[in-house]
Image (cartoon, coloured by chain):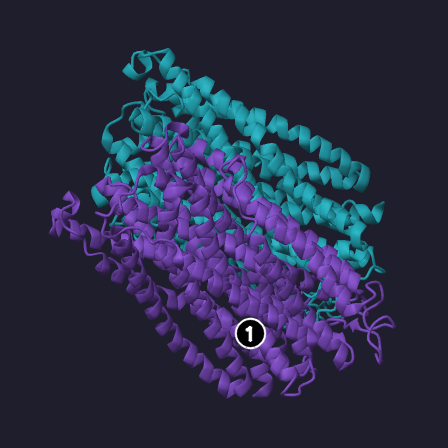
Chain colours: A purple, B cyan
Amino acid sequence: MTIVYLALACGVIAVLYGLFTSGQVLRAPAGDARMADIAAAIQEGAKAYLGRQYTTIAIVGAAVAIILFLTLGTLSTVAFLIGAILSGVAGYVGMNISVRANVRTAEAARASLQGGLTLAFRSGAITGMLVAGLGLLSIAGLFWYLAGPAGYAPNARPIIDALTALAFGASLISIFARLGGGIFTKAADVGADLVGKVEAGIPEDDPRNPAVIADNVGDNVGDCAGMAADLFETYVVTIGLTMVSIALLVKAPSAELLNLMAVPLLVGGVCIITSIIGTYFVRLGAKGSIMGALYKGFWVTVGLSVLAIYGVLQWVFGDLNAVIGGAGFLEGATDTLTTEAVLGTEATAGAQFTALDLFWCMMIGLAVTGLLVWITEYYTGTNYRPVKSIARASATGHGTNVIQGLAISLESTALPTLVIVVAVIATYQLAGIIGVAFAATALLALAGMVVALDAYGPVTDNAGGIAEMAGLPDEVRHKTDALDAVGNTTKAVTKGYAIGSAALAALVLFGAYTTDLKEFFPDTIVDFSLSNPYVIVGLLLGALLPYLFGAFGMTAVGRAAGHVVTDVREQFAADQGIMAGTSRPNYARTVDIVTRAAIKEMIVPSLLPVVSPIAVYFIITAVAGQGEGFAALGAMLLGVIVSGLFVAISMTSGGGAWDNAKKYIEDGNYGGKGSEAHKAAVTGDTVGDPYKDTAGPAVNPMIKITNIVALLLLAALAGG
Amino acid sequence: MTIVYLALACGVIAVLYGLFTSGQVLRAPAGDARMADIAAAIQEGAKAYLGRQYTTIAIVGAAVAIILFLTLGTLSTVAFLIGAILSGVAGYVGMNISVRANVRTAEAARASLQGGLTLAFRSGAITGMLVAGLGLLSIAGLFWYLAGPAGYAPNARPIIDALTALAFGASLISIFARLGGGIFTKAADVGADLVGKVEAGIPEDDPRNPAVIADNVGDNVGDCAGMAADLFETYVVTIGLTMVSIALLVKAPSAELLNLMAVPLLVGGVCIITSIIGTYFVRLGAKGSIMGALYKGFWVTVGLSVLAIYGVLQWVFGDLNAVIGGAGFLEGATDTLTTEAVLGTEATAGAQFTALDLFWCMMIGLAVTGLLVWITEYYTGTNYRPVKSIARASATGHGTNVIQGLAISLESTALPTLVIVVAVIATYQLAGIIGVAFAATALLALAGMVVALDAYGPVTDNAGGIAEMAGLPDEVRHKTDALDAVGNTTKAVTKGYAIGSAALAALVLFGAYTTDLKEFFPDTIVDFSLSNPYVIVGLLLGALLPYLFGAFGMTAVGRAAGHVVTDVREQFAADQGIMAGTSRPNYARTVDIVTRAAIKEMIVPSLLPVVSPIAVYFIITAVAGQGEGFAALGAMLLGVIVSGLFVAISMTSGGGAWDNAKKYIEDGNYGGKGSEAHKAAVTGDTVGDPYKDTAGPAVNPMIKITNIVALLLLAALAGG
């Protein structure tokens, strides 16, 4: 239990860091009255939206909680509610700090680029550490209570069920938050651009545009709150499911199992500390490269994490080379720890591993993080071929810009897939499915740092907007734009990272599904072979989900943006003073319109991954019997990741590349702002918006929900 | 053998129909000297391109033939060459008739819409019947020779190998033809539009545009020759692999097996006859609906095919209700026909079926064809929500047009997937994998009619171009445009149909792979369970292929179109007389530039599906042993279809919808030609071009090649 206590302590440190740094950020000067006025409007809009969003989600959540209570009992319901509430808190806190940091960043950027960077990055780091810290506290706290005071064995069913329900709560809220926020932010953004830049010919963030506040609200509720809820979900699912897979697959005495299950918690804990240390290294060098400054912090964290993870294993296991559970480990071990065969897989049966194997698996996890960051930077950064090729294609028009952007979207899936494939093979060779799970855990252990890198983006985006609206000097806007361009890359990084972890987790989740199946339904023959047509059917139906979900998301943005266009046109027509700059547009009305549209549009697609697995199971069972129903459902879980990985990466990387191709042109290439190439690049950016910020990132929680609903369905069927 | 003779006779009838109808088409008046001049330029360009394309392919083909000769022997090499050469012939003939029919269609459209429709449709029907006829003759001829004069048992290895090699030849040529032609046609189209419509502000098909002939050549070498080679491939693979799967899976005495294997041939044969009859029913009704006229021919063919298929089964099997191979069937049956268990699949083991079951499976195949046609019309026709929604989104700009188009692309995958899933389940329940194979055969049996519907499109497109260039009255162009709009839908239909058949065939191909594996490597344990991580790895790598392939295709079009733009700009700059209309542009130079670019760009992506399965097998075998190598390779085969189905459908349907949204606006909606909405719609059309005509359709042969290469690899490994 000492391990769990230490992990809890790390979680508390993360929260304290958040409180302490919030104080720093809030003490920074908040600019003049005009800036404060604008910031207040953004705050108000963001709070109003999140308030209504969470009210709606609460209704769905309550309905789900009742179903869970009736089918799976009190414990699962409580765990579900903890996950759901903390996911909401993570999002809310992220938004709350972001809407205060934006105006302060604008003010700080007046003085220096470093000042703006520090302020924006700190506010991102608060969100990052709270996401990781709250995630860790929820899992570790639940585990501590159940394995401690409640007295359950670490692999007892209630612990497995509670961790699964916790993950479900986090996932369900996060898909709503990701999608609702994503629809809000892009509907406002696209709508504001269409009617402002394109129709009225006024610049982005011009205060005469009635949609301008809604656009800035969107950065906070989508890119910040939605992202935080999403990463909270990813953190809880990955670390929680690693523990569940240990409980399900490793046979060992309780005390040893408890220690092994606590390792992912402590790894998460020490990496929060290394992430906090890393944040203090984010400083501009002599060359003034912003990405370089962020990299400094990131690589310090990675380097320290290697040492910290090694230390954790050394401390927990002593001899790293002894087979875990063998003589070198705790006294009183009755048999050797072995991962159990998963439904007859030859290779898994009897696989043994040492602590050193786990160390290497986690190093592979860290390497995957580093490689995904590097690949994403390559595909979305303004210094490399992909973005430059889109910018070049813009010179020949809108059509070629979009064609090249789509080509880059498709291409950008290749390297991440190869990295993930190599990681799966290597970690599996080292320690079976447990090895894959530990790699995913190490990947997610850096979430605090990765979220920090991401969450700074929307803050600078907002700061730029405020600078523009408040009429600050152009050089301020120039600085915030430079920060924002890097933010486009770091935003894409987080999304690739989240979906990459989902791909690693897929095998772990499927392992949990098959093990549960064997436990709950020992007499049902389930054939997961690819030659079973119901497996093909499941794969195809699973593969369909990200496409259908993407279609919903894209259409929702288009439709909601249409409402914005109509509203702004009406405001312009009703009051000529708006364009003249003599009257103030009704910002709140536009915010309200986007709010209602986003909340209405998020419901159906968010329920798709909840309802689909249940429908597939019951329909196939009715047609071909329960065995085939389980086979099709299992295959669906893999189908959704096999297709979702590509849909998500192509959308998020492609969207980032489009956005930065526009920025690259705005930096004076191919004619710069106002040129024909720039107009084409604006089109590409508009297309990329819902790709990268609505449909693409929401695929990650969608995949998890499909998987977790399947696990819960098994438990419900077994109980019923 | 009587059955095979009858099938051969039907193939001969198809060829005779082609010759007879060619005569009819060629006897139609070819217009005035100006028109003949333009048509000659198009003919010349198309022949020059295809000549160089086939020369390049011949070099690759010869290299592959040598490898086949060294690894698999003479028979496979000869079969490969037959498939390759006939695929080339199908493409060449399709192009050849199309470049003659275009000018005659323009001339006929002067007199009446019906005249234009009849001429264009007849020329399409020639291509259609030759594709089906040559396909049938190649399979039936090879089967006749091997099972007859050469004296092999119908399920002897040489027959299986020869049919597989025949399919490989057809597939390999068709991927080059599809991709090379696709790159040519869209590079020319996009390049001509960019520099003509957008930069110079001259209309489409304006004779002052130096790229205009290249654009019209493209319709013939891409949409006609490439499509014909593709469908030839699909026909040969589907019917050939149905026979192979019968040989591999059904245990019965030779005489019975021979009859059962000949049934797909005769079904193909009688459906050629019903297709020929159907072509005579394509006539405009009182309402003048072009789609209605085409539907009349299509539904007559479907109706007659139902009767013909029933008749074939009745004639071959006598009692439709007796278990095939049971007492009701041929004398001397030693045991009951059963489909053998495929690697221990519970459901397949011992599945029995009757001729009536096969009849229903084929009815399901026909129903799938009808449903795919209907769904594609819904998603790409100008009368329905999807196209109208894209047109509406065009009113708010380029960005929203593309967003809505992408949303429709993603959405359009849902219904076809559900149709295919239901068809797989239903046919599998009826007669196991053999049932799925027979459904695919019935689907493809209508290829003659479907290709006829498709191939008429490029002819009318060309006719419109010639009318424009030759300065025919506007009303002629109006008629050809109306024909062309329907052509966009029928083109999308063929592509959806081809990829749909690939999805059905996937299970059959995987069945062949596993059965081969068991036969060649009885001692290697291969675990195809989804819980084997190498299966996940294979699925992911397979799923990557269509994305990477799509990226290559899109980039190639963008790059080649860039060459066109540069060339045309140079021509305009060098000679002011071109824009003034006083000097004739150098059309041949542009054609030559596109030719070189297309041939250069087609090589690497076409080899991707040839090399990938071999690489995956050897790398995974080196890392984890042969069993896992086979598992990963097998999973790759399914991964490529699970992702390819969605990539292909989304691209082809989405592209068709974009194209027709433009046409819908040109019909006077949302401001009509020249409006801002129209400009946005032109952008969407440009984006859709490489989607629907380059990357999307080439996914179909790519999937087949991956599968067939895997089968050949097994044979080569076993022989080596």
Which residue does the image show at 57% across and 83% down from the upper left? Answer: A717
Up-down relation of residue B456 to residue A572 (above or below): above
Which residue does the image show at 63% across and 31% down from the upper left? Answer: B57
Answer with left or right where residue B637 lies relative to residue A588.
right
* Relative image position of residue B576 (x, y in whole percent): 32, 12
10 Å crowding of disc 1: few (<14), some (14-19), many (20+): many
Q: Quadrant of the N terminus of chain A?
A: bottom right
Q: Quadrant of the C terminus of chain A?
A: bottom right
* Relative image position of residue B664 (x, y in whole percent): 28, 45
In depth, the one of A567 and B266 nearer the eye is A567
Res. B625 in view = yes
Please give the residue where the numbered disc 1 appears in the rendered image: A138
State which quadrant residue A501 falls in: bottom right
Which residue does the image show at 46% across and 74% down from the upper left? Answer: A85
At numbered mark 1, what does the secondary structure look like: helix, strand or loop? helix
Answer with left or right where residue A268 lies relative to residue A334.
left
* Relative image position of residue B99 (x, y in whole percent): 44, 28
Number of marks: 1
In depth, the one of B268 and B634 nearer the eye is B634
Res. A510 in view = no
Answer with left or right where residue A181 lies relative to residue B9.
left
Residue found at the very far right of the displayed protein? A327
In depth, the one of A267 and B338 nearer the eye is A267
* Tag 1: amino acid: Ser
Up-down relation of residue A42 to residue A474 (above or below): below
